Structure formats: structure tokens, C-alpha cells
């Protein structure tokens, strides 16, 4: 029973790490990449639809993205979402595709993105710690109810602490890499 709880905690912590990596990847750096559009949803015939499902993305050079919608009817909706999004983009529509030239990041904007990255990293660490607390409560309840011995409970708690440290360190590493990428000019 406790082994299952620890395995479940490890699985959940892994998912929290993946969410953190996805969130960090969606933060814009000086280079263009398709994952920066992964969090944008377009109103497509009344339903919010991820932009990745509505168009193909082609990176022409380090700062230029060409977005070609599969359905030309979605072009204005995609353009509207890009213009109003928090990425600070100014798309241009040529009738067949939407071209985006990424502006150079200012020092102030880089600092804002670093703050955003740190917030997302901290949210992920809080999530991992919440998983740890819930699993520790499960272990403590099992010890209290007499389902397992105190030695096994202590061993399980140490294992959970080790998992928590491992995943928090991985989140910190991903955050450090993103900060370095943002500061790179």
C-alpha cells in the first residue's frame, strides 16, 4: 500500500516537472520557436482550440515565424490572438499565411520574463511539495492505524523526501537554464 502511494507520488511529481518544463518553454526568448505558441487558444467556430491544432509553424530564421493555417477561415482569429496575447507580437497577414518578426528583447522585458519564469518554477515546486505533504499524510495515517510499522513509515518518509529533493532540483535546473537563455543577448 505504501509502495503504491510512493510510486503514485513519484508519478505526480514527474508530471509537475513536465508541466514546469512546458511552461518555461512557452516563455519567449530572443529566438523564435513553435512552443511559444503552445499555450495560445483560438476561438475556432465557438470553441477554444489550441493554435498548434489549427496551423503549421515554420521557423524561417532566428526571429521570423511563418504560421500557415490549415483552414483559411481561422486566419483572422489566429491573427487576433497573436496580436492580443502577452507575447508582444505584431503579426502581418498576406492572405495565405501569417508572418511574425520577433522584436529584439529589451533588458526590461528580459527581466520581466525572468520574473515570470521564476514564478512558474516556484508554482511547480509548490505543487511537488503539496504532493509530498499528501503522501506523508498517507504514510502517517497508515502508521497511526497500525497498517505498517514505524520503521517502515520512517523509511517511506525518507524515500518521499528524497524524491521531493530530486524533483525540486530538476525544476531549479530547468529554471536556471531558462534564465541563462533569457539573459543571452
Image (cartoon, rainbow, N blue to C red):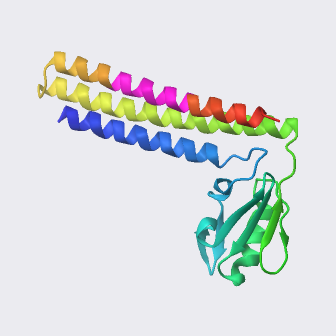
Q: Residue at x 77, y 53 (%)?
A: 87
Q: Residue at x 74, y 52 (%)?
A: 32
The answer to whether 140 appears left or right of 40 in the picture is left
Can you give x and y, in whole percent of width and height, for residue 109 in the image? 83, 40
Occupied quadrant, residue 46: bottom right
Occupied quadrant, residue 71: bottom right
The answer to whether 2 appears left or right of 97 in the picture is left
| 33, above or below 139, in the image | below
Q: Residue at x 18, y 29 (%)?
A: 142
Residue in front for this viewpoint, 48 or 102: 102
Magenta highlight range: 160-172
Residue in front for this viewpoint, 69 or 159: 69
Q: Quadrant of the C terminus?
A: top right
Can you give x and y, in whole percent of width and height, for residue 114 in the image? 73, 35
Can you give x and y, in whole percent of width and height, for residue 140 in the image? 24, 25
Q: Quadrant of the N terminus?
A: top left
Occupied quadrant, residue 148: top left
Can you give x and y, in whole percent of width and height, for residue 90 in the image? 85, 61
Q: Residue at x 73, y 74 (%)?
A: 77
Question: Residue extending furthest front?
Answer: 61
Q: Main secondary structure of the magenta part?
A: helix
User: Is residue 40 on the magenta stretch?
Assistant: no
User: Is residue 166 on the magenta stretch?
Assistant: yes
The answer to whether 140 appears left or right of 35 in the picture is left
Amino acid at each position: 500500500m505504501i509502495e503504491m502511494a510512493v510510486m503514485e507520488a513519484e508519478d505526480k511529481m514527474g508530471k509537475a516537472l513536465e508541466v514546469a518544463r512546458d511552461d518555461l518553454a512557452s516563455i519567449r526568448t530572443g529566438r523564435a520557436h513553435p512552443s511559444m505558441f503552445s499555450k495560445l487558444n483560438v476561438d475556432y467556430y465557438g470553441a477554444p482550440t489550441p493554435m498548434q491544432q489549427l496551423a503549421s509553424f515554420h521557423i524561417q530564421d532566428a526571429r521570423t515565424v511563418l504560421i500557415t493555417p490549415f483552414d483559411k477561415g481561422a486566419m483572422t482569429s489566429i491573427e487576433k490572438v497573436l496580436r492580443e496575447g502577452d507575447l508582444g507580437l505584431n503579426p502581418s497577414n498576406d492572405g495565405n499565411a501569417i508572418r511574425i518578426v520577433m522584436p529584439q528583447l529589451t533588458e526590461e522585458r528580459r527581466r520581466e520574463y525572468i520574473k515570470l519564469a521564476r514564478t512558474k518554477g516556484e508554482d511547480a515546486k509548490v505543487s511537488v511539495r503539496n504532493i509530498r505533504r499528501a503522501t506523508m499524510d498517507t504514510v502517517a495515517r497508515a502508521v497511526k492505524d497500525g497498517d505498517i510499522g514505524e520503521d517502515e513509515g520512517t523509511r517511506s518518509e525518507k524515500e518521499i523526501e528524497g524524491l521531493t529533493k530530486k524533483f525540486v532540483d530538476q525544476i531549479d535546473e530547468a529554471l536556471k537554464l531558462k534564465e541563462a537563455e533569457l539573459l543571452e543577448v
